[in-house]
Image (cartoon, rainbow, N blue to C red):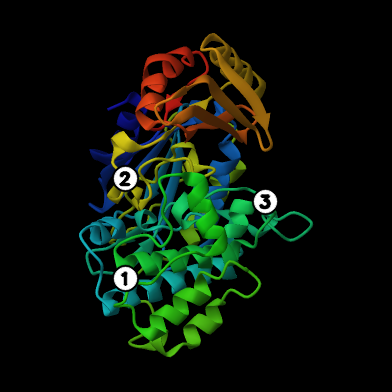
Amino acid sequence: MENEEGCVVVQQYKFGKLLGQGSFAKVYHARNLKTGMSVAIKVIDKEKIMKVGMMDQIKREISVMRLVRHPNVVQLYEVMASKSKIYFVMEYIKGGELFNKVAKGRLKEDDARKFFQQLITAIDFCHSRGAYHRDLKPENLLVDENGNLKVSDFGLSALTESKRTDGLLHTACGTPAYVAPEVVNRNGYDGAKSDLWSCGVILFVLLAGRLPFHDSNLMEMYKKIERAEFKCPNWFSPDVRKLISRLLDPNPDSRISIPKIMDRTWFRKGFGPPKATMTDSTPVREAVDQFLSNAGGFSPCESTNAVSDEKQDHEKLANLNAFDIISLSAGFDLSGLFVDQDQKTEVRFSSLQPAKTIISKLEYVAKSLRMKVTKKEGGVLKLERQKEGRKGTLEIDAEIFEVTPNFHLVEVKKSNGDSMEYQKLMMDDIRPALKDVVWVWQTG
């Protein structure tokens, strides 16, 4: 255990096992030494997030969780900081991710309906507070020991004030298979309507045990999303088919709204108010206000001293792996159920270098491999081999996404040619040559 964590242990918490980790954070199970209450503590590396310019995103995540105090949302109990770490003390949800239930097979309609009811209720509350989640998926939906759903991971969330003068959000984010077509198009989108699209994908996944939109090629999958090209299994009831078709409407203006969802007979069946309990929000609001007002500098083991004494339940790993920005996080969608890792034709890496440095390096690598380089729209470089291979000319696209001016994500994928030839070239030549600009490879 690190010194900072040991210091916190002396004051209030005893750290337990590591629940998970990402590039910027680790999440531990812990116990409050005064009350005995189990909590999940997310330990964020302050130096790393400041280096890549993400402190504002951390503050926004805290601000959103301060606002959305709801029985079906994971609670934030306390925020603390040392010189090098930020600590989120959160609910510990014993049941784990909803994803784990789906991975075992599709749910019965009544079970799926219950989770969907709780999801819509929670999202409706978030939207009423001007908060939009923007990364809804089964991995970010936890289930407590009583079978109640808890929405978690607000690392990609946005507040109303994030909108531009056109009233729309413009940050492309989310997880590929769950992202709305208007987000893919990057022309601005309504956060509430894009959340509802994700809810539609989640409902489909719960009932079908698979994704409505899937393709090993990311661009092909985006095309299916833009056309809302999906087919419901024959066991879907007529009411479910109609609801999902309204949720997965590619036109956000005609997409069904939450009030109309709640008016549907299918939704109202067995529907009741949230049964989960939660603590009073006042101490947390005061604690978060104090943290946000002093977020510039902290003394070692500084605490907001606002932990609730009430019994509670969990937040697993809220993976801060670049906050899954621009959908480039591996392992957080259901594609692993359908695509063998060895057959994947794209890899991604994060970089702390400026975009022009990354582009120059890619051009240099291509030249050394005698590959033709063509610049395309949207920050895409096409690398093309001069000689044909087993399945035509090998072509590789490299697309650069800006997370912050000091932090970029790069997706490198085969757009033509033989997969084995591509994988060999990546492993033997391209990956080693890019080591100077790569911070972390996201996929293998």
Does residue 406 appear in this view?
yes
Q: Which residue is mark 3?
A: 170
Q: Which residue is mark 1?
A: 207
In front here: 374 or 17?
A: 374
Labels 3, 1: front one: 1
Proximity of marks 3 and 1: CB atoms separated by less than 8 Å: no
**Relative to 242, is 381 on the left or the right?**
right
Q: CA distance from mark 3 to mark 2?
A: 31 Å
Mark 3: which amino acid? His
Q: Secondary structure at mark 2?
A: loop
Q: Residue furthest bottom?
A: 265
Q: Secondary structure at mark 1?
A: helix
Q: Position of residue 229 (x, y in %)?
A: 49, 64
Mark 1: which amino acid? Leu
Reply above or below: 230 against 238: above
> Residue drawn 51% across and 58% down?
224
Q: Residue furthest right?
A: 165
Q: CA distance from mark 3 to mark 1?
A: 31 Å
